[in-house]
Amino acid sequence: MIELISNPNAWVALLTLTFLEIILGIDNIVFLSIVSGKLEEKDQPKARRIGLLLAMAFRILLLFGITWVLSLQETILAIDWGFFEAHITGQSLIIFGGGMFLLYKSVSEIHHKMEGEEESTSGKAASSLSKAVIQIALLNIVFSFDSILTAIGMISMKSPIEGGFGPEGAIIIMILAVVISIVIMMIFAGPVSKFVNEHPTIQILGLSFLILIGVMLLAEGSHLAHFKFGNDTEVGIIPKGYLYFAIFFSLFVEFLNIKMRKNNKPIVLKNSKIIDKELEDNDLTD
């Protein structure tokens, strides 16, 4: 432990991994905000706390079971039909199933918000909270696998002599990164959820992001299972950088829209003054 504290590389690794865990937790916060937004106001903070605590617990348990997590990469079912080939692993099944669940949930929520019937608040609060916790727990399992696999790939478990932190040091760094990132997300989860639930366009954008993340998980699960079609055409992964760039750019554009609507000062386009002048003339002649 003393060696880790005095090692500047360990601090750099901790800060980098913490930042990455927060970025990877954005989808978790969006899902929490949308699911908890359907509950009564007094139950929403409780659902968010439970969701983030479950996320932390799942991640720490998986870190202590790294050997089991890595064993999920072994093939449990091989398929070779000529036109289609796959080597399905436990890890690929979890990631793929999570993507399917996220797609189903996101599309269902969009349908409910756009065309669904209004919910009656009587007698549904307790069951809604339990359903929300179950949904959060199921998706947290998938997000936790994705997060821990990323962390394992970043932090070297080699001995300090070989330039790593050793197995124990690496696990300590990863656990600290998980705990710090979850605490930071707990602090900001309330304001983020309030902002999301107060702006319908942000809710739809958030659900659209979850659809993108679901597609990314499907591609990642297919890649981990080595899906091949035709002449050895293997399914690739979608780089997370592209996905998060699309998310942040869309949010930036929507923040500009919200700001303009707030000021009630619409942008005047080049031809708009001419059009306005013609409308005024028509009104005067009428």
Image (spheres, rainbow, N blue to C red):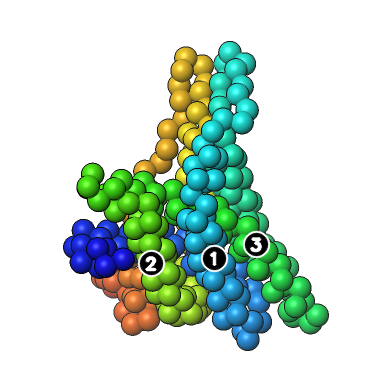
Cα distance in 3D space between marks 3 and 1? 16 Å
Badge 2: residue crowd in 10 Å (few <14, some 14–19, many ≥20): some
Q: Position of residue 135 (x, y in %)?
A: 65, 62
Badge 1: residue crowd in 10 Å (few <14, some 14–19, many ≥20): some
Which mark is on residue 135? Answer: 3
The kind of residue tagged 3 is: Gln
Q: Is the Cβ of the residue at disc 3 closer than 8 Å to that at disc 1?
A: no
The residue that appears at 24% across and 63% down in the rendered structure is: 3
| Sequence-earlier tag: 3 or 1 | 1
Per the image, the residue denoted by label 2 is: 176
Q: Position of residue 139 (x, y in %)?
A: 58, 57
Q: Is residue 107 above or below residue 218?
A: below
Per the image, the residue denoted by label 1 is: 57
- Kindly tell me whether residue 142 is visible in this rendering: yes
Q: Is residue 189 above or below residue 26?
A: below
| Sequence-earlier tag: 2 or 3 | 3
Q: Is residue 177 left or right of residue 269?
A: right
The kind of residue tagged 1 is: Ala
Task: Determine which quarter of the picture holds residue 21.
Answer: bottom left
Q: Is residue 79 left or right of residue 253?
A: right
